[in-house]
């Protein structure tokens, strides 16, 4: 069992009503009821972080005397970044909402929904704020337009 992940397993002593904790190298003195821990009987696999990819580009140059020089260039590519589509939509609609009123309402809705995801939360907040500014601006503009139009009649 030495290659097993740490977690709760059926008691090796044979007591089917108990789970015992395996720390990855040894059994501990921690026990749990099998019924209470039935959902966690299988250990949770740890999340492996995405490692950057390393690339080596090999280039060979020839000089005037016929000799060759080898040059290795090593570079790394960063792991892909996570994205929050609602946050992006909120920011785009927030910017558009400054010119087009209905887009501000969409920015507010997607901004509120996008803030629930921790990825790009700042972008969702920016879209939410721009959406609110756009909607308030359009309401003030509409009231001004109605007031000016009413003064001519």
Image: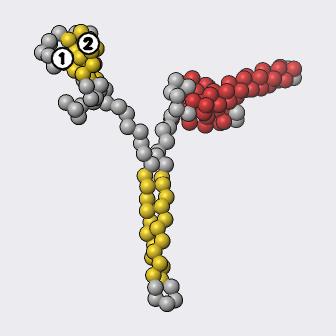
Q: Which mark is residue 31?
A: 2
Q: Describe the colour scheme in one phrase.
A: secondary structure
For the image, the number of numbered tags is: 2
Position of 113 relative to 88 (above/below): above
Q: Quadrant of the N terminus?
A: top left
Give how far across and how far down residue 56 sits, in percent.
Answer: 43, 62
Could you say which disc has been placed on residue 11 in the image? 1
Can you see residue 28? yes
Residue 133 vertical position relative to residue 88 in the rendered view, above or below:
above
Q: Position of residue 122 (x, y in %)?
A: 61, 31
In the displayed orientation, state which residue is furthest to the right.
151
Cα separation, mark 2 vs mark 1, equals: 8 Å
> Helix, strand, or loop for circle 2?
strand
Q: Quadrant of residue 128?
A: top right
Residue 143 numbered mark, or none: none
Residue 24 located left or right of residue 77: left
Residue 21 location, quadrant: top left
- Which residue is painted at 52% across and 23% down in the image? 116
Marks 1 and 2: in contact by CB < 8 Å? Answer: yes
Q: Secondary structure at mark 1?
A: loop
Name the residue at 48% across, 61% down: 74
- Residue placed at 27% from the left, 15% from the top? 29
- Label 1 crowding class (10 Å Cα cut-off): few <14, some 14-19, many 20+? some
- The part of the image, by quadrant, that contains residue 4 is top left
Closer to us: 116 or 71: 71
Between 2 and 118, the one nearer to me in the picture: 2
Q: Residue furthest left?
A: 14
State left or right for residue 51 relative to residue 29: right
**Quadrant in which the C terminus is drawn:** top right
Residue at 50% over, 27% down = 117
């Amino acid at each position: 069992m030495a290659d097993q992940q740490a977690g709760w397993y059926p008691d090796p002593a044979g007591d089917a009503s108990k789970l015992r904790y395996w720390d990855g190298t040894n059994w501990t003195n921690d026990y749990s009821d099998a019924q209470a821990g039935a959902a966690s009987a299988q250990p949770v696999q740890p999340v492996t972080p995405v490692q950057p990819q390393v690339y080596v580009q090999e280039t060979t140059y020839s000089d005037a005397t016929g000799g060759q020089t080898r040059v290795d260039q090593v570079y790394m590519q960063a792991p892909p970044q996570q994205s929050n589509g609602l946050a992006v939509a909120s920011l785009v609609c927030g910017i558009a909402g400054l010119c087009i009123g209905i887009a501000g309402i969409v920015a507010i809705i997607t901004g509120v929904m996008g803030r629930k995801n921790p990825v790009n939360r700042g972008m969702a907040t920016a879209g939410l704020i721009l959406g609110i500014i756009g909607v308030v601006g359009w309401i003030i503009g509409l009231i001004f337009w109605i007031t000016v139009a009413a003064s001519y009649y």
